[in-house]
Amino acid sequence: MLACSLLSACAPSLNWRDVAPEDADGLKALFPCKPQSYQRAVKWPGLATDVTMHVLSCQADERTWSLSYTALPDVALIGPALQQWVEVMRGNLASAARMAASAEPVVSHDQGAVAVPHMTPMQQAHAWRFQAQRADGLGRPMAMDVQTWHFSHGMKVFQASVSGSADQAQGQSSEDVAQAFFQGFHFPG
């Protein structure tokens, strides 16, 4: 918490708070703004019925901070689901680039394994960074930076993300704030 307090002093637009997402296996999160929560039914690869996707999201410091998660009915789906989420993110960013009439490809970088305290260890639990284009408020292409963590606990899969303009994402303090968000996730011991 001390590190987040220091970060808040450097970024007055951030108002850090502890969040306990509903139906998330006791997950605790640290958000830099008050997230709105909603649910929706989504199709999931390999399943005949929809799953309920939970989403918490807010905007601060010109970025969007979010956590998405869902429960899957079969343990064999957990590992593939973490990888599928990477592909879904890549596909969504490619669609946004097409809408911005950008010819730039989506660039993705596997940032390595993640460790959320007391998560279910999975080989596919990784951090990713994506660079892509999307339309700004005037329809012009804008360079985007998206950082994600994919992890699981029990039968649930999670995606935490920070997204914003590539210009906003540059700089050590911006990286520190994003890492404070990702490091703020933990499950009860």
Image: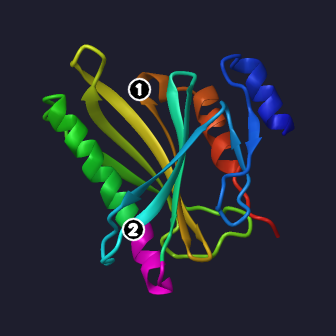
In the picture, measured across the screen, residue 25 lies left or right of residue 162, that is right
Residue at 41% x, 35% y: name it.
145
Q: Nearer the viewer, residue 172 or 43?
A: 43
The answer to whether residue 12 is above or below residue 89 is: above
Secondary structure of the residue carrying numbered label 2: helix
> Where residue 10 sits: x, y (%)?
73, 19
Residue at 41% x, 26% y: name it.
165
> Where residue 67 sits: x, y (%)?
55, 49
- Disc marking residue 83: 2
> Where residue 127 sits: x, y (%)?
51, 56
Magenta-highlighted residues: 73-83
Q: Residues within 10 Å of mark 1 (few under 14, many from 20)?
A: many
Point out the image quarter for the N terminus: top right
- Extreme residue in the top direction: 138
Q: Is residue 169 magenta?
A: no
Q: Quadrant of residue 58?
A: top right
Q: Nearer the viewer, residue 144 or 30?
A: 30
Q: Quadrant of residue 83?
A: bottom left
Q: Mark 1 belongs to which amino acid?
A: Ser
- Disc marking residue 165: 1
> Where residue 182 sits: x, y (%)?
63, 48
